Image (cartoon, coloured by chain):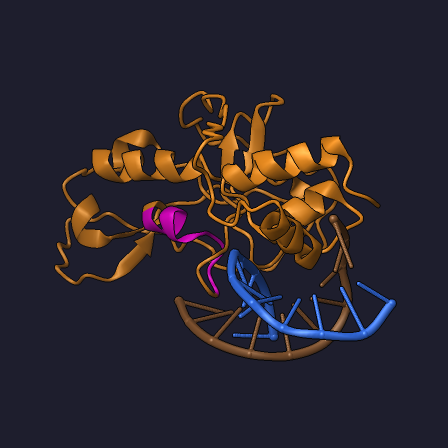
Chain colours: A orange, B blue, C brown
Amino acid sequence: MSWTDERVELLKKMWNEGQSASQIAKELGGVTRNAVIGKVHRLGLSNRNQAGEVEAPVLEPSAPVEPVVAEPAEPAPRAEPVEAAPAVETDDADDEDEQDAPIPARRQIVPAGQPLPPQPSANEISAEALETVREVEKSSKRLTLMELTERTCKWPIGDPASENFWFCGLPVQSGKPYCEAHVGVAFQPMSSRRDRRR
DNA sequence: CCCTGATTCGC
DNA sequence: GCGAATCAGG
């Protein structure tokens, strides 16, 4: 593969969008991240952004969709109940402990045997948190189902029933299924969810 | 171990 | 110019 104008353009675009060298390399195909980094330097744009100002088009993910049950497209091979959300009984047993508690997750099945993250009802998340997540999602890697790995955030964004759908894909928080931002909304301290009694 | 970008240097 | 190898760091 050679650096055709088109490939260089894509490289520039992605680099200015903040994509990592490996991401770009994957997108381009036929090159390694080293090649990308090397090219980036030769092009003298090691300093991300400056003129480009290529704002990610990010189509509004049509607001937090209600839990969408993914059709078991293919029989998932005994999906490991990874961080299966324990039935969180929001009883009146007010516990002040700051123990993290996953919000109820809908059982969803992914061919890869990965449990899908819960679709949070916007009303359960603080405004700021939601804001932050929205912000972070702008830089999501927009991975497809097949591109998910054990260390890419599996938080779904958008409407699964449409083309406007992808997975976050940002680096997961070591061990967890989501990136930092999404772990934040997926696992909330009891205290912050106490007031929203059922 | 996973990842990131930066640099070097033989080709 | 290219990019693998290597380095430095999270």
Q: Give the residues in magenta.
A: A175-184
Q: Nearer the viewer, residue A178 or A23?
A: A23
| Residue A32 % position (x, y) | 72, 55
Q: Residue at x 16, y 52 (%)?
A: A191
Task: Inspect the magenta stretch and tell me whether residue A167 lies in it.
Answer: no
Q: Quadrant of residue A2?
A: top right
Residue A142 in sight in this render? no
Q: Is residue A9 left or right of residue A185?
A: right
Task: Inspect the magenta stretch and tell me whether residue A179 lies in it.
Answer: yes
Q: Is residue A186 left or right of residue A191?
A: right
Is residue A18 positioned above or below A80 on the image? above
Q: Residue at x 60, y 37 (%)?
A: A12
Q: Is residue B7 left or right of residue C4?
A: left
Q: Is residue A53 left or right of residue A24?
A: left
User: How many badges with numbers are in the image?
Assistant: 0
Q: Nearer the viewer, residue A108 or A160?
A: A160
| Residue A37 % position (x, y) | 62, 54
| Residue A88 % position (x, y) | 32, 51
Q: Nearer the viewer, residue A68 or A47?
A: A47
Q: Residue at x 66, y 49 (%)?
A: A39
The quarter in which the C terminus of chain A is drawn is top left
